[in-house]
Image: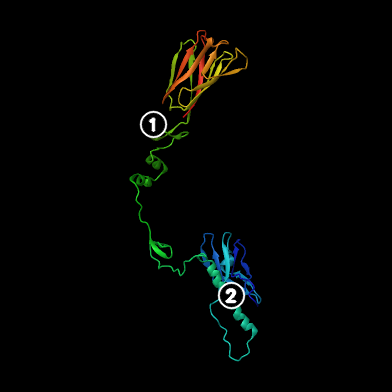
Amino acid sequence: MTVATTANRQSYNGDDATIEFVFTFKAFEASDIKVVVRSALGVETTLTLDTDYTVAVLATTGGTVTLIGTYAATPPATGETVTVYRDLPYTQEIDPVENDPQRADVAEEGLDRAVILIQQLKDAMSRSIQLPVSTAVSDLSLPEPEAAKYLGWNDDGDALENRELISSVGVSSFMAGMLDDTSAAAALTTLGLGQGTANHKLFMNAAGTAPEWALGNFSGIFTRSTTTASGDQVISGLPFKPSAILFVGCISGLAGRMAVAFAGGGSAAFCGIWDAYNTLPNAWYYSGNGLIFRQGADSGHEYTGVISSISSDSFTITWTKAASAIEGETITVNYLMWR
């Protein structure tokens, strides 16, 4: 028979039941076939012929491996792999007698064995590390193993050598302290961040010199009586200096008295819209003058608030009361500010 396939091994997945495995490559006798079972963890076990398995070799090509003993009682499980491979001895047993007639089947078997041995070598080479075909490096050899060393290329990149492991790496005292930390909380402290607080975010402090955990937004409320004369009103106790503030103000119980304004950039920049109910029902006007509350149709009846300054923990509203402004009412202002 010819050697019609280049296969030298076949692998099968375990399924907790199968104990017979058919192979399709040529073998001459049972001892030519080896079996390895690989566990799910990658550990290989070489089975023993007539103890763990038997082999039925077909007269043409191929055959069947049957597990016996403990492997028949407990077949290879799911996640395990069974590999059946051919491993002929590297010997030549044909001894022709001079001037004797040569049997064709004997000569063919010798040729078949030679081809199979070549296939075994090719199979082994295909699972080895090889240099690219185009490389100029050749005649490589491995150095003798040495404890606590690793294999690497030399400085010229043309030979392998045993290299020293790096026993220590110099680090700064700061990093040494960082590496000594045994928990995330300790590492945060070393980094100067401290332990985070629920619903807080990490920001730079107002001076821009260190990080801190803080609220990203804050809301509040304040009131202003329209009886009060023009002047400043300081809203203090803020947890941070805001970069933007949204105001919504109204006079409770008085129809058409509502204003919305926005201040941004950390300065006195202010824009807003106000309800022109008394002038035109359901109409809103834009204004760059902040919070506007108007009794009549003209500016002479306004009570207006403009943000005049923003500090690290407060902002100031400068109120202006026109001559005929609303009297005896209370303006309630809700604000939402962002860091």
Query: Whole-percent x and y of residue 229?
Result: 46, 10
Outermost residue, left direction? 173
Query: Whole-percent x and y of residue 41?
Result: 52, 59
Q: Which residue occupies 47% across, 31% down?
A: 216
**Amino acid type of the residue tagged 2 in the rendering:** Ile
Lower sequence index among marks 1 and 2:
2
Please say if 113 is above or below 193: below
Query: Do labels 1 and 2 touch, CB within 8 Å?
Result: no
Q: Tell whether 136 sits left or right of 63.
A: left
Of 39 and 237, nearer the camera is: 237
Please say if 288 is above or below 148: above
Of 52 and 10, nearer the camera is: 10
In the picture of the structure, the residue carrying the numbered disc 1 is 207
Query: Whole-percent x and y of residue 217?
Result: 48, 29
Q: How is the image coloured?
A: rainbow
Of 101 and 29, nearer the camera is: 101
Total labels drawn: 2
Query: Whole-percent x and y of residue 322?
Result: 50, 10
Mark 2 is surrounded, within 10 Å at the Cα level, by few (under 14), some (14 to 19) or many (20 or more) other residues, namely: many
Task: Give the SS element for disc 1.
Answer: loop
**Amino acid type of the residue tagged 1 in the rendering:** Ala
**Residue 247 visible to the viewer:** no
Image-quadrant location for residue 235: top left
In the picture of the structure, the residue carrying the numbered disc 2 is 116
Q: Which residue occupies 54% across, 11% down?
A: 299
Q: Which mark is residue 48?
A: none
Please say if 75 is above or below 86: above
Task: Give the SS element for disc 2.
Answer: helix
Of 301 and 126, nearer the camera is: 301
Distance between mark 1 and mark 2 Cα atoms: 80 Å
